[in-house]
Image: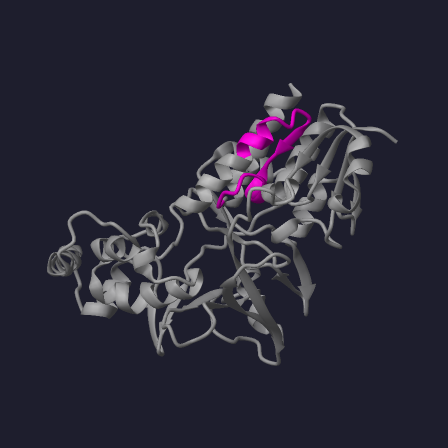
Amino acid sequence: MHYDYLIVGAGLYGAVFAHDAQLRKKSVLVIDKRPNIAGNVYTEKVEGINVHKYGAHIFHTNNKEVWDYVNHFATFNRFTNSPVANYHGELYSLPFNMYTFNKMWGVVTPEEAAAKIEEQKREAGITDPKNLEEQAISLVGTDIYEKLIKGYTEKQWGRPCTELPSFIIKRLPVRLTFDNNYFNALYQGIPVGGYTKMVANMLDGIEVQLNQDYFTDREKWNAMADKVVYTGPIDAYFDYKLGTLEYRSVRFETEVLDKSNFQGNAAVNYTDRETPWTRIIEHKWFQFGKDDKGKDLPKTVISREYSSEWKLGDEPYYPVNDVKNCALYRKYHALAENEKNVIFGGRLGEYKYYDMDKVIASALDCADRILR
């Protein structure tokens, strides 16, 4: 059979494009090298709990069009992301807010907190932040940087904070209010039934072939469609001929525990440098309220996350968008512009750190331009 579109990758970008193409009466084939749909947002049931196999994903957006779109495919619960930071057994509220400042310094008013941050910024002599360390100290002061940012960030990126660009920390909320909702987003939640169910609803009625590696027989796959929507790594598409783009990868250790409550929160970040994992996720608290029936489940599922250097063959998670890699990506992007029948999209195809709502918005925009 011949198709209008071959979509390589059954993650969010591919599923959204496929759904919109089908609505416009286009024939579509979706393939994925994994044995499951939904890419990195894949969830699977373990002990009655939807486990985020490739790391925690909390949907959040200020884009009402995107929010309305995803609500066609899932009902969202009212989960609010309020992680906790654990520094050698001391627990702090995240994101940085008045609860954090009170625990750290004993301050009780926003004025006192702001004055303390300004005092530590002045003592550090920072006027024009040049790297992540200087940017962090200018935002929250030296104490919070040393306890709650430095160790976690260096584990996450595998580099000293002085070698990381300042923009990485700029997206972290800092509030002089008692608000521990991590995201500044009007809409937020987790799909009831898990992300896999949501993506399956997007792909309803569309032919999907799993365990299919596009690169094992690219000519065969290309011959099956007029156009290709490619959501894999852009450098892999060109056989790495200009060099390899760098990522950070993540390894997960997931276990089922014979207790109903391990840490009392969905996410606890371990911010000291000595603890080898960056955070522990307790998956049931994404799904059940802490005073809801989740406490009655006799078991719980936790995942420890370990950040690591990426090498070919590992799962790529976070693009290293430094000067060197961005320059290399621009060269690959120029090559991609000459592939007239191929659309490159998504986190890997565009070498971009994408939140889920931005992936969906990008796919909707692309589908509107290409399919109208």
Split into 4 quadrants, where in the image is the N terminus? top right
Q: 41 left or right of 100?
A: right
Q: In which quarter of the image is residue 259?
A: bottom right
Q: 172 left or right of 258?
A: left
Q: Quadrant of residue 104?
A: bottom left
| Front-lying residue, 247 or 210 | 247
Split into 4 quadrants, where in the image is the C terminus? top right
Identified at 72% across, 45% down, the residue is 200
Q: 32 left or right of 133?
A: right
Q: Where is residue 209 in the image (x, y as percent from the top left)?
A: 80, 45
Furthest toward the bottom, the residue is 258
| Front-lying residue, 104 or 149 | 149
Q: Where is residue 267 in the image (x, y as percent from the top left)?
A: 47, 65
Count how many numbered circles sit on residues in the image. Answer: 0
Q: Position of residue 191 (x, y in %)?
A: 60, 50
Residue 73 visible? The answer is no
User: Residue 341 in magenta?
Assistant: yes
Furthest toward the top, the residue is 372
User: Residue 280 in magenta?
Assistant: no
Q: 4 left or right of 17?
A: right
Q: Position of residue 27 (x, y in %)?
A: 79, 28
Relative vertical location of residue 175 with respect to residue 26 in this rendering, above or below: below
Relative vertical location of residue 4 with respect to residue 79 in this rendering, above or below: above
Looking at the rendering, the stretch of residues picked out in magenta corresponds to 333-353
Q: How is the image coloured?
A: one colour
Residue 152 visible? The answer is yes
Identified at 53% across, 64% down, the residue is 285
| Front-lying residue, 135 or 21 | 135
